[in-house]
Image (cartoon, rainbow, N blue to C red):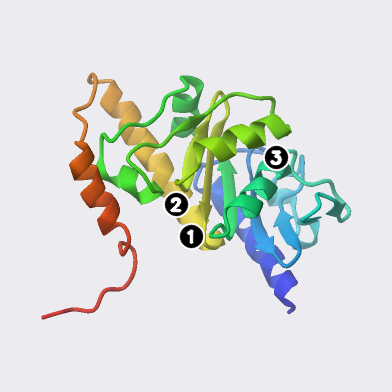
Amino acid sequence: MSAEAQLRASLLSTARAMSAARLNAGTAGNASVRAAGGMLITPSGLAPESSRAEDMVFVHSDGTAQGRLAPSSEWRFHAALYANRPEAGAVVHTHAPFATALACQRLEIPPFHYMIARFGGDTVRCAGYATFGTAALSEHVLAAIEARSACLIANHGMVVFGRDLGHALALAIEFEALCEQYWRTLQLGPPVLLTPAEMADAIARFSWYGSAVPNED
């Protein structure tokens, strides 16, 4: 199996896993992976369960698409992330319930929990609203996700990127859990927030969090 065929199969598996994890339903949301000369992205209007690996669409770096089907309507912000964030190897966009609920309130997630640091800063921002699939939405996403690996999109959902498809999916699942925790916290009232110093310490520790660490005993 060629490298591209493997990427196509992995992308389809990731899209199906997003549905299984209840991050998306039906044709909502999309995923992509960086590839030589561009990216592979899920097709527009086709549910993962009805898709095949060959349905994944190759979009060249110049924005031209190659394949039987049209790329996801959100291909522009995927392409913009790959062009502007060299560390991004895969991008996941979902309409997960709790992330979307917060996004519809246009809420920035404050440092109510140290796991906010998992996504690169002491907050997770909410991108401004623009019609889906537009260049304006791409600009809003790029601004909100600067120095972060996740953001909400106003009245829309979430975007997360990772070093590869497995990493991006894991982060999206973690982010939805964090959104649920914040939503539930808000039912009790405004949360007690961590201080800038406490968050700076958490951010520093996340430089190695998730990696195998030798036992020093």
Closest to the observer: 184 or 161? 161
Q: Amino acid at mark 1?
A: His
* Residue at x-position 32% and y-position 61%: 207
Q: Which mark is residue 74?
A: 3
Q: Amino acid at mark 2?
A: Leu
Q: Amino acid at mark 3?
A: Glu
* Residue at x-position 74% and y-position 71%: 5
What is the distance, in whole Å, between disc 3 and disc 1 at their CAs?
20 Å
Q: Which mark is residue 167?
A: 1
In the rendered view, tell whether residue 10 sits above or below residue 19.
below
Q: Which tag, 3 or 1, sits closer to the chain's start?
A: 3
Res 190 → quadrant: top left
Q: Which mark is residue 171?
A: 2
Mark 2 touching mark 3, by CB under 8 A? no
In the rendered view, tell whether residue 182 sits above or below residue 49.
above
Quadrant (top left, top right, bottom left, bottom right) of the C terminus:
bottom left
Look at the numbered disc 3 and give the secondary structure of its residue. loop
Look at the numbered disc 2 and give the secondary structure of its residue. helix
